[in-house]
Protein backbone atom coordinates (compact mmCIF):
# COMPACT_ATOMS: atom_id res chain seq x y z
CA UNK A 1 0.00 0.00 0.00
CA UNK A 2 1.43 3.34 -0.98
CA UNK A 3 0.99 6.07 1.59
CA UNK A 4 0.72 9.77 1.00
CA UNK A 5 3.34 11.89 2.78
CA UNK A 6 1.23 12.98 5.72
CA UNK A 7 -2.28 11.75 5.07
CA UNK A 8 -2.10 7.98 5.30
CA UNK A 9 -3.49 5.59 2.70
CA UNK A 10 -3.91 6.91 -0.81
CA UNK A 11 -7.44 8.23 -1.12
CA UNK A 12 -8.00 6.86 -4.62
CA UNK A 13 -7.72 3.28 -3.40
CA UNK A 14 -10.83 1.77 -1.85
CA UNK A 15 -10.06 -0.07 1.37
CA UNK A 16 -12.14 -3.16 0.76
CA UNK A 17 -9.82 -6.16 0.50
CA UNK A 18 -8.58 -7.95 3.62
CA UNK A 19 -5.05 -6.90 2.73
CA UNK A 20 -6.00 -3.21 2.55
CA UNK A 21 -7.90 -3.50 5.84
CA UNK A 22 -4.81 -5.01 7.48
CA UNK A 23 -2.50 -2.32 6.10
CA UNK A 24 -4.88 0.50 7.11
CA UNK A 25 -5.28 -0.94 10.61
CA UNK A 26 -1.50 -1.18 11.06
CA UNK A 27 -1.07 2.37 9.78
CA UNK A 28 -3.63 3.63 12.31
CA UNK A 29 -1.89 1.75 15.12
CA UNK A 30 1.52 3.21 14.22
CA UNK A 31 0.07 6.73 13.96
CA UNK A 32 -1.47 6.34 17.43
CA UNK A 33 1.40 4.45 19.07
CA UNK A 34 2.80 6.73 21.83
CA UNK A 35 6.38 5.48 21.45
CA UNK A 36 6.36 5.91 17.67
CA UNK A 37 4.98 9.44 18.04
CA UNK A 38 7.59 10.29 20.69
CA UNK A 39 10.42 9.30 18.32
CA UNK A 40 8.74 10.67 15.19
CA UNK A 41 8.54 7.24 13.50
CA UNK A 42 6.42 7.42 10.34
CA UNK A 43 5.21 4.42 8.35
CA UNK A 44 5.73 5.29 4.68
CA UNK A 45 5.01 1.99 2.89
CA UNK A 46 3.59 -1.36 3.81
CA UNK A 47 2.97 -4.54 1.86
CA UNK A 48 2.87 -8.23 2.70
CA UNK A 49 6.17 -8.90 4.47
CA UNK A 50 7.48 -5.40 3.76
CA UNK A 51 7.61 -2.04 5.52
CA UNK A 52 9.40 1.27 5.13
CA UNK A 53 9.58 3.51 8.21
CA UNK A 54 11.10 6.99 8.42
CA UNK A 55 12.61 9.00 11.29
CA UNK A 56 14.39 12.35 11.39
CA UNK A 57 17.39 12.51 13.68
CA UNK A 58 16.82 15.26 16.23
CA UNK A 59 18.77 16.24 19.33
CA UNK A 60 16.13 14.40 21.37
CA UNK A 61 17.64 11.09 20.22
CA UNK A 62 21.33 11.96 20.65
CA UNK A 63 23.70 9.99 22.86
CA UNK A 64 26.40 11.41 25.14
CA UNK A 65 28.61 12.12 22.12
CA UNK A 66 25.98 14.18 20.29
CA UNK A 67 25.42 11.34 17.80
CA UNK A 68 22.35 9.25 17.11
CA UNK A 69 21.67 6.97 20.06
CA UNK A 70 21.89 3.31 19.08
CA UNK A 71 18.56 2.76 20.84
CA UNK A 72 16.88 5.27 18.53
CA UNK A 73 18.21 3.47 15.46
CA UNK A 74 17.15 0.15 16.98
CA UNK A 75 13.66 1.58 17.58
CA UNK A 76 13.44 2.58 13.92
CA UNK A 77 14.48 -0.95 12.90
CA UNK A 78 12.03 -2.50 15.34
CA UNK A 79 9.11 -0.44 14.01
CA UNK A 80 9.84 -1.58 10.44
CA UNK A 81 10.23 -5.18 11.63
CA UNK A 82 7.02 -4.99 13.67
CA UNK A 83 4.92 -3.67 10.80
CA UNK A 84 6.39 -6.02 8.18
CA UNK A 85 6.01 -9.11 10.35
CA UNK A 86 2.40 -8.30 11.28
CA UNK A 87 1.40 -7.40 7.71
CA UNK A 88 -0.09 -10.84 7.15
CA UNK A 89 -2.89 -10.07 9.59
CA UNK A 90 -1.91 -12.35 12.44
CA UNK A 91 0.01 -11.43 15.56
CA UNK A 92 3.80 -11.79 15.24
CA UNK A 93 6.22 -11.19 18.09
CA UNK A 94 9.98 -10.79 18.03
CA UNK A 95 12.09 -13.81 18.88
CA UNK A 96 15.51 -12.43 18.00
CA UNK A 97 17.00 -9.26 16.54
CA UNK A 98 20.65 -8.61 15.73
CA UNK A 99 21.95 -5.28 14.54
CA UNK A 100 25.18 -3.97 13.08
CA UNK A 101 25.82 -0.23 13.31
CA UNK A 102 27.91 0.75 10.30
CA UNK A 103 28.01 4.55 10.17
CA UNK A 104 26.64 7.30 12.40
CA UNK A 105 24.01 9.42 10.67
CA UNK A 106 24.51 13.16 10.40
CA UNK A 107 22.58 15.37 12.80
CA UNK A 108 19.22 16.27 11.33
CA UNK A 109 19.34 13.57 8.68
CA UNK A 110 16.30 11.51 7.79
CA UNK A 111 16.65 7.76 8.17
CA UNK A 112 14.66 5.06 6.44
CA UNK A 113 14.37 1.51 7.78
CA UNK A 114 13.31 -0.98 5.12
CA UNK A 115 12.20 -4.40 6.36
CA UNK A 116 11.93 -7.28 3.88
CA UNK A 117 10.65 -10.73 4.64
CA UNK A 118 13.15 -13.29 3.38
CA UNK A 119 11.43 -16.45 4.61
CA UNK A 120 8.13 -17.29 6.27
CA UNK A 121 6.75 -20.55 7.53
CA UNK A 122 3.55 -21.24 9.44
CA UNK A 123 5.21 -20.23 12.72
CA UNK A 124 8.45 -18.31 11.99
CA UNK A 125 9.32 -15.30 9.81
CA UNK A 126 12.81 -14.05 8.95
CA UNK A 127 13.48 -10.43 8.02
CA UNK A 128 16.36 -8.31 6.76
CA UNK A 129 16.21 -4.67 7.73
CA UNK A 130 18.48 -1.95 6.39
CA UNK A 131 18.72 1.64 7.57
CA UNK A 132 19.79 4.28 5.07
CA UNK A 133 19.89 8.05 5.17
CA UNK A 134 18.51 10.43 2.54
CA UNK A 135 21.85 10.17 0.65
CA UNK A 136 21.33 6.38 0.51
CA UNK A 137 24.32 5.77 2.82
CA UNK A 138 23.96 2.51 4.73
CA UNK A 139 23.75 3.30 8.46
CA UNK A 140 22.83 -0.08 9.98
CA UNK A 141 21.71 -3.59 9.06
CA UNK A 142 19.65 -6.05 11.01
CA UNK A 143 18.47 -9.64 10.88
CA UNK A 144 15.29 -10.43 12.79
CA UNK A 145 13.11 -13.44 13.49
CA UNK A 146 9.44 -13.37 14.54
CA UNK A 147 7.17 -16.01 16.00
CA UNK A 148 3.89 -16.03 14.07
CA UNK A 149 0.93 -16.65 16.35
CA UNK A 150 -2.38 -17.91 14.99
CA UNK A 151 -4.66 -15.17 16.29
CA UNK A 152 -5.66 -12.22 14.10
CA UNK A 153 -4.44 -8.74 14.90
CA UNK A 154 -6.68 -7.51 17.74
CA UNK A 155 -7.17 -4.07 16.19
CA UNK A 156 -8.58 -5.27 12.85
CA UNK A 157 -12.03 -3.89 12.23
CA UNK A 158 -14.79 -6.34 11.29
Image (tube, helix red, strand yellow):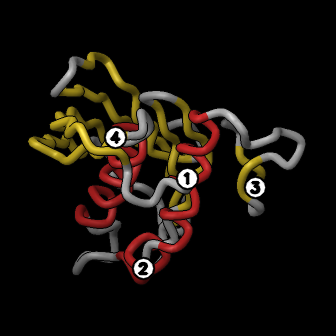
Select label 4 or label 3 by which is in front.
4
Q: Is residue 138 visible?
A: no
**Mark 1: few, some, or many residues within 10 Å (few <14, many ≥20)?**
few
Q: Earlier in the sequence, mark 4 or mark 3?
A: 3
Nearest the viewer among 4 and 29 is 29
Marks 3/1 in contact by CB < 8 Å: the verdict is no
Q: CA distance from mark 3 to mark 1?
A: 27 Å
Nearest the viewer among 83 and 14 is 14
Q: CA distance from mark 3 to mark 2?
A: 20 Å
Counting from the top left corner in percent of width and height, residue 156 is at 49, 54
Counting from the top left corner in percent of width and height, residue 8 is at 71, 56
Residue 5 tag number: 3
> Quick one: SS at disc 1?
loop
Nearest the viewer among 14 and 69 is 14
For residue 47, above or below residue 75: above
Residue 90 tag number: 4
Which residue lies under the disc numbered 1?
158
Residue at image coords 33%, 69%: 67
Q: Earlier in the sequence, mark 3 or mark 2?
A: 3
Residue at image coords 81%, 40%: 14
Q: CA distance from mark 4 to mark 3?
A: 27 Å
Q: CA distance from mark 2 to mark 1?
A: 24 Å
- Using residue 81 as the reference point, say whether residue 100 is left or right of it: left
For residue 125, above or below residue 68: above
Select label 1 or label 4 by which is in front.
1
Counting from the top left corner in percent of width and height, residue 120 is at 26, 19
Q: Is residue 147 visible?
A: yes
Q: Earlier in the sequence, mark 3 or mark 1?
A: 3
Amino acid sequence: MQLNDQTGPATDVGVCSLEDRIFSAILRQVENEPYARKLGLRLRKIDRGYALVEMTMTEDVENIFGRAHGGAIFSLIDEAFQTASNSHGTVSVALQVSISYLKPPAAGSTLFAEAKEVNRSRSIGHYEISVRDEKNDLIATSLAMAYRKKEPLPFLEG
